[in-house]
Image (cartoon, rainbow, N blue to C red):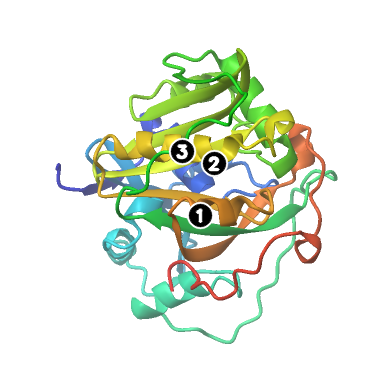
Amino acid sequence: MTEPFIRAIEDRDIEAVVQLWHDCGLTRPYNDPYKDISLCRSSGHGEILVLEEAGAIVATAMVGHDGHRGWVYYLAVSQDRQSGGVGRMIMTSVEVWLAERGVAKLMLMIRTDNLAVRDFYLRLGYEIEERAILSKWLEEPASDTAPMVHSTIIHLAMDAPPTSPTPHPPAGLKTSLIRAVQPTVSFYRWLYDTVGAGWTWTDRRAMSDSDLHAAIISNSTEIYVVYVDGVPAGFGEVVRYKDINEAELMYFGLVPEYIGRGLGTYFIRAMIDIAWSGEPKRITVHTCDLDHPRALANYQRAGFVAISREVELVPDPRRVGLPMPPAPEDRDYPSVVHLPVRGE
């Protein structure tokens, strides 16, 4: 594997950087990441550092100074690299960048409930100071700035293939499972929107056609459609991470009319077998408290083990044509408070 190295952002990196920020939950409806990148690069006293590994951007940090103190924003590390010292590497480069410019102190802001990030900085030698932060919008965000939706994500993993026989499709249903090798954007959108509408699937609704097309035809992505009597009844999507030899069941679900007809048990096992066909060392899946109330139990029954949880902020689904989900306390989902918080 190519040794990781840190450099300044280039024009060709911008889309990958914004996607990483989005994946790490750093974007907000009232912030334009493209504008932030442009402003930083043109300011003369800031830089965006990227850590590149094997041709991919796996970490970023926006560093700058105000003539007195140094600041850092948009520290992001790809989820599959968050335990390998990558964050420490890029923060070291941030500190070197500031020291070379005569800046004696680095300051940063984190949200008080972001305990994992707080502990990361404490391990690097940062100290919590008692200060009040005052702010004022000089350019007011749009009046329709949308609220964020809190969602608890549950991460599950399977470290060995199932040993039980693969179940047959339900009797009486003429079923077929076919890989969509080069799905069109319109067909994929129909699948994603139809399967995910009831569970607040927003990520790919918000993607442009060009970005979505690139994602679904990627060499690492495999999309399978289950048909009943020739009608699409659901889909599953496997992403293979060859650099770490893992596979993820990225998306899985049924069209509403086919839920409760006994198809799910067969379909989830079929997708698990497909994921294991590449001989990864582990396969993973995640669900959340916006998903079907039986989703977690179904994954566990199929052989997945819940390993951690985390809270994610989901952009207002009304922006992509979906209704607001119930408040967290009103969701019909099993409690997962016994699971460790991811990153702790």
- For label 3, count other residues whose C-alpha is less than 10 Å away and answer few (under 14), some (14-19) or many (20+): few
State yes or no: discs 1 and 3 in contact (Cβ < 8 Å).
no
State yes or no: discs 2 and 1 in contact (Cβ < 8 Å).
yes
Classify the position of the C terminus by image quarter: bottom left
- Quarter of the figure with residue 227: top right
Q: Earlier in the sequence, mark 2 or mark 1?
A: 2
Residue 323: % across, % down: 82, 41
Q: Earlier in the sequence, mark 1 or mark 3?
A: 3
Residue 281: % across, % down: 25, 49
Query: In the rendering, which numbered label is found on residue 167?
Result: 3
**Residue sitting at 56 percent across and 51 percent down?**
298
**Residue sitting at 15 percent across and 47 percent down?**
3
**Residue sitting at 32 percent across and 67 percent down?**
102
Amino acid type of the residue that numbered disc 1 sits on in the rendered structure: Arg
Residue closest to the eye, 268 or 149: 268
Disc 2: which residue: 265
Rendered view: 114 above or below 313: below
Distance of label 1 from label 3 (alpha carbons): 13 Å
- Quarter of the figure with residue 1: top left
